[in-house]
Amino acid sequence: MDPVNPELVGDWPLPPVVQSDHVPSESEQEQIANRIRTMELAQENLENEIEEVKRSLELRIAEARAKREMIESLKGSLSAIRRLPDELLGEVFVFCVRLGGTSPWVLTHVSQRFRRIAFNTRKLWTMITIPSKKLKKRPYTYKFYRHHCGDIQSLRYILSLSGKAPLDVIVEQSSDEVALTLVQERERWDILEFHNYHSDHSIMFRVTNLGMVRKLSFVQSWVPFQWLEVAKPVSLHIGPMNGLSLSETAWWERLEDLSLSGSFQANIILDFRQNFSTLLQKVSKRLTRLNLVNILFPGESTIQFPRLRELAVNDVDGWHHIGCKNLQKIKLLQVAAFPTKIDYPEVQELEVGHYNLDTILGQLDLPNLDTLTISGQWWYSSRDWRNIKRLRLRLDGSSYSNLAYQLRPLHHVEILEVYDTPLALPFLKKFEAGQKRSPIFAVLKQFLVDYRQIGTKVAKDKLTEAFQAIVQSRKSNHPLEKLTVDWPLRQGGGMTEFV
């Protein structure tokens, strides 16, 4: 038997028999029994006192919680958001929905005021998708802030909430009843996107009187070219093969944004040497954005685009014959042929993929470049690019064994943005400042990570520890002004501000 600590039983002396192998006599047994009854009564009294203390503590904790909630409520009454006019707060809602991915229905469950403002803000209810019934399960990246109206009742309800605001509609499949309902709202068509839509007899394409359609997009869809004469969009995106009949249209006077895609099949790549030179000549005077994919560009002459500000090319042979001295943003993904030297004096943003940076930046003269976006699985640079202050990474599926080494030449970067890129923990370790080593991006001020649409799960707890270690290690010599992480939507989303 283990010895009993006398301090635990207070002033109750223990008989010698308790701490020995002696067999107690009858009188000793009676004495011990009395002692047990007395101590059980004392134990019961102590436990009652403990329960009373617990109840008192719970009451105090509940009282403190109630006061804390009241304090937060009182602070909320002093919040600047209460002083915002309803119209301005409605615009904030629109910003949260379109850029932050918040569902409008979430806003209706915050407070009575938020609910009233949300339902009165027409622009919150203008982004409509007519989904295809063939797609039973939506991918997690599907834009949940859009209103998916798979039946006529839900479509009519959302249209009623949108009032007279311009509509942003994605059509994947539509019945005659749904198409007719959309046609009745044709004066409000602002953005129309057709995804895998092959209904050439749709009533939507028989409309002859339209409002001002700003953007038309046909993704893997049949294109009614004669209808384009009616729509006359400002922005047009046309997928593979559909560009072959573009020269038959005459709606160029409004077009400012053009996106053309050829085909990955070599024998049907769009060939500009036939009739597309004429096409580009027609749009060159007003075009501000141009996106070309899988296209053969004529190499015999340069077409000047005096107003072009953004150029994106992907597997486009001869793209450097596009004359655009005022270009500000250029995107080069798998360029089929590269020029010897091009001067783009106004370019500030460059996006590249699957390239050796030395090749690109060595053959392009970009004196004002300050923002670099790297999209792809491999790149390398050995130069010291002092002018690049902002770096964006989109490297899903890349190997990170040498990434820190490859990024070293960009050590003047002050803002790093990472999108949908699974950052390995050993790579994040390179951001920590140590006694014997300087961190990667030593002058970094802002580190922004966006995991919202990432295709894989992330270890949130381990990444949180890694980001906290980065902040802590750089406090003295390389402090960060901002470090935020937007977590994957498939894992609940949310944002963490580490700095």
Image (tube, grey):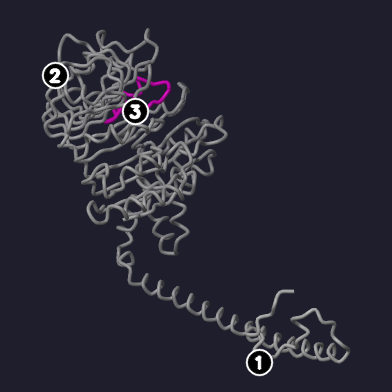
Kind of residue at badge 3 = Gly
The residue singled out by tag 2 in the image is 341
Q: Relative to the observer, which residue lies in front, 35 or 87? A: 35
Task: Give how far apart the Cα atoms at labels 1 and 3 are.
Answer: 79 Å
Left or right: where 307 falls relative to 271: left
Residue placed under numbered mark 1 in the picture: 11
The amino acid type found where label 2 is placed reads Lys
Q: Is residue 190 left or right of residue 65?
A: left
Tell me the number on the disc at residue 376. Answer: 3
Residue 347 in the image, given as x and y percentages of width and height: 16, 32
User: Residue at 41% across / 51% down in the picture?
Assistant: 464
Q: Which amino acid type is shown beneath numbered disc 1?
A: Asp
User: 212 or 280: nearer the eye?
Assistant: 280
Q: How many marks?
A: 3
Residue 219 picture location, percent across and down: 40, 26
- Image quarter where the C terminus lies is bottom left
User: Of label 1 and label 3, which has the lower sequence position?
Assistant: 1
- Work out whether residue 333 can be spotted: yes
**Residue 351 higher or lower than 68, as above or below:** above
Q: Secondary structure at mark 2?
A: loop
Q: Quadrant of residue 168?
A: top left
- Magenta residues, as a range? 218-237
Q: Which type of secondary structure does the marked residue at label 1 adopt?
A: loop
